Image (cartoon, helix red, strand yellow):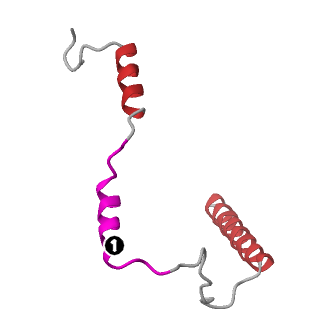
Amino acid sequence: MAAGTSGQDGWEREFDLAWAEAAEHKEPSARARMLAARWRENPPGPVPFRGDPDPAGPRRTSWLSTVLVLGCVVSVIVVLGYVQVRGGGR
């Protein structure tokens, strides 16, 4: 038997997993137990599905963002072309 193996073949492991998943009661996680204890003493209030956050500031329109990105790309292309022309002429 190789080091690190438990000696069970695949069928025995599958049987064990099926047996464990079929158990009637599963112990809740530590976080679930902690929250249940906390909520027993102080139940949480109702929370909306999604809160309406206040807008941080005026939003840019999509066309303005597109123009800004394309302007940056064109300026980089122009600068790289200028550097290549100036450097290649020497």
> Measured along the vertical axis of the image, is residue 51 above or below residue 69?
below
- Magenta range: 25-45
Q: Quadrant of the C terminus?
A: bottom right
Asked whether 56 or 84 is in front, the reply is: 56
Crowding at dot 1, Cα within 10 Å, few <14 / some 14-19 / many 20+, comes out as few
Asked whether 2 or 79 is in front, the reply is: 2
Q: Locate residue 34, reporting x and y percent.
A: 29, 64
Q: Residue at x 36, y 44 (%)?
A: 26
Judged left or right of residue 61, residue 41 is: left
Q: Locate residue 53, reporting x and y percent.
A: 59, 85
Q: Quadrant of the N terminus?
A: top left
Q: Locate residue 66, reporting x and y percent.
A: 76, 72
Q: Residue furthest right?
A: 63
Judged left or right of residue 60, residue 47 is: left
Asked whether 60 or 66 is in front, the reply is: 60
Task: Look at the numbered disc 1 and give the secondary structure of its residue.
Answer: helix
Q: Quadrant of residue 18?
A: top left
Q: Quadrant of residue 87?
A: bottom right
Judged left or right of residue 4, residue 55 is: right
Q: Quadrant of residue 72?
A: bottom right
Q: Locate residue 32, reporting x and y percent.
A: 35, 59
Is residue 19 found inside the magenta-colored segment of the image? no
Is residue 26 found inside the magenta-colored segment of the image? yes
| Numbered marks: total | 1
Judged left or right of residue 46, residue 40 is: left
Mark 1: amino acid: Arg
Q: Which residue is mark 1?
A: 40
Q: Residue at x 30, y 68 (%)?
A: 37
